[in-house]
Image (spheres, grey):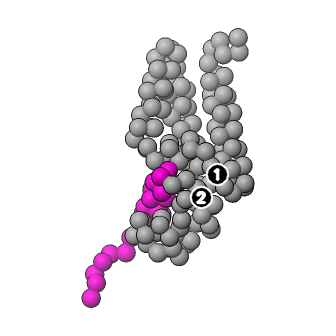
Amino acid sequence: MSTRKRMPAAERREVIVRTATEVFAERGYDGASIDEIARRAGVSAPVVYDHFASKQDLYERLLERTRDELLEVWRHHLFTDEPAAVRIPRAIEAWAAYVETHPYASRMYFRDATGVPSVQEFHREIHAQGRAALGMILGRERGAGN
């Protein structure tokens, strides 16, 4: 008789997300499979589908999450009353630290999507949104309009 404790849904979802990020970073969208993600996460494929409608849905949510986390790094460090000479180097350092501490997320995010045209288009759109948002963040800097 097994007395293994069932993992809460939110925790299980986070394990799937973390594992999927690694698999997408390692193999790209086309090379990743729900079966491998499930196996490495210690769940079954149907459990992955309980949390995400499809492989594409999972991939898109991960891209959005990474974009939002990277933009939040910029916002957090740039939207203060400190001088730009303090804020900007700190923001760049924080961004680099994010990339270093989230190597799979950053690798997946910056890796070109191949194969499925709708996935490629979504990837391009996420990057365009990220660039536009970063442009707005940086545009708030004194002298940015010159």
> Mark 2: which amino acid?
Asp
Residue designated by label 1: 114
Mark 1 vs mark 2: which is more N-terminal? 2
Q: In the image, what residue type sits under mark 1?
A: Thr
The Cα–Cα distance between marks 1 and 2, rounded to whole angstroms, is 7 Å
What is the tally of numbered marks visible in this picture? 2
Residues in magenta, as a range: 1-26
Quadrant (top left, top right, bottom left, bottom right) of the N terminus = bottom left
Residue 121 visible, this angle: yes
Q: Quadrant of the C terminus?
A: top right
> How far across and down, in percent of the image, does residue 5 sit?
32, 75
Would you say 15 lies left or right of 50 here? left
List the residue tagged with mark 2.
30
State the residue at coordinates (60%, 64%).
55
Measured as percent of width and height from the top left, residue 35 is found at: 50, 70
Q: Main secondary structure of the magenta part?
A: helix
Q: Residue at x 59, y 58 (%)?
A: 30
Query: Is 33 or 126 nearer to us in this picture?
Result: 33
Report the residue at 48% width, 64% height from top.
37
Residue 111 counted in the magenta span: no
Any mark on residue 47, and which?
none
